[in-house]
Image (spheres, rainbow, N blue to C red):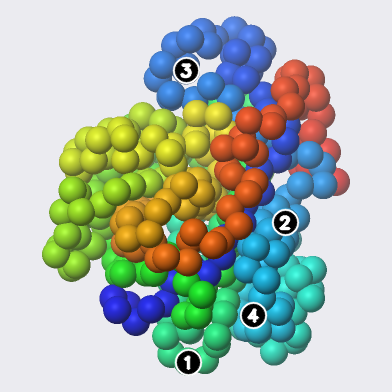
Amino acid sequence: MKGEGVGIVSYGTYIPKYRIKVEEIARIWGENAETIKKNLGVYEKSVPEVDEDAATISVEAAREALNRSNLDPKRIKAVYVGSESHPYVVKPTSTIVGEALGLENDYFSADLEFACKAGTAAIQICAALVLSGLIEYGIAIGADTSQGAPGDPLEYTASAGGAAFVIGKNGVIAEIEGTYSFSSDTPDFWRREGQPYPRHGGRFTGLPAYFRHVINAAKGLMKKLELKPEDFDYAVFHQPNAKFPIRVAKILGFDMDKIKQGLVVPYIGNTYSGSSLIGLAAILDIAKPDERILLVSFGSGAGSDAFSLVVTDRIEEFNRKPEVWDKIKQGVYIDYGLYAKLRRKIKFR
């Protein structure tokens, strides 16, 4: 895709306002909150209300993206929603989004599922459709209300949120300089049909899954484009916790200054398909023309999509308010009682 001019025209995010602190979850299970925070680098997470699911989160993020772009919705000819918590097993989320946005009926649409990287896969699909000339603009979304069983380590990080990106050739604020994917059959995290919560392979989720795929995707992209870590101004990696992306950044040669702006997981948790994309949005909130951004997602099962994005002059005229960090700071804290009540209503409604 290098030099073709396709890229991000606009973006939007949505983060539920409710938050629960690690201390509150640890209190219920009689665990040491300080140890958990030290091990995960996560201090609190977002909690969805009963009316906040992958569909409503996708709609809100996409509405913000469209409003910022001032595009006529009828020019959007593709909607792809990546999530592992689609509200329906049989009934697409993408058509709910299309209807809510007021799109005409002649648009490509599908729901995607590849654990936490389905949102970046949606970006690749929209970019390919734009490059082929089949569409002028498409919307790619990554959104989740992730689940962790009560008492499971995932309960401290599994959260909710999403990001939407309008992809096109006209009015690009960040050009996709190139993309590269690395995939394998590595079953580190899974959930069978009908099971309410996923299962994970413990330590197997680290080196064989997350680190192998993220590192190889990043290195593959840099080799393809003949770039080095010092050529990038920012980097954002999938954030299942804070320790993994910090460690992978060091392995690849990126210092904290390049990843801290997009490192949102300590304060909102792991939003799964929205994780790396919300981090990217936080970087775009402050990015300047000609700066280069490395984005690497990760999805269990397993695979990573890597992107090199170059910010254009149009970013200076683009409305970036409210910023992601503004939304993060607007959280309302709840106790475990309300948290459990919300989880029960979402599960059994």
Q: Is residue 141 visible?
A: yes
Which amino acid is tagged 3? Lys
Q: Quadrant of residue 7?
A: bottom left
Q: Position of residue 44 (x, y in %)?
A: 58, 25
Q: How many neighbours does mark 1 have within 10 angstroms: few (below 14), some (14-19), or many (20 or more)? A: few
Q: Earlier in the sequence, mark 4 or mark 3?
A: 3
Q: Earlier in the sequence, mark 4 or mark 1?
A: 4
Q: Earlier in the sequence, mark 2 or mark 3?
A: 3
Q: Which residue is mark 1?
A: 133
Q: Is residue 46 above or below residue 230?
A: above
Q: Residue at x 47, y 52 (%)?
A: 284
The quadrant of the rendering that contains the N terminus is: bottom left
Which amino acid is tagged 4? Ile
Q: Residue at x 41, y 31 (%)?
A: 242
Q: How many neighbours does mark 2 have within 10 angstroms: few (below 14), some (14-19), or many (20 or more)? A: many
Instruction: Determine which of the numbered discs, if any, sits on residue 76 in the image.
Output: 4
Mark-to-mark CA distance, 2 and 3: 30 Å
Q: Which residue is mark 3?
A: 37
Q: Which residue is mark 2?
A: 60
Q: Are marks 1 and 2 in contact (CB under 8 Å)?
A: no
Q: Earlier in the sequence, mark 2 or mark 4?
A: 2
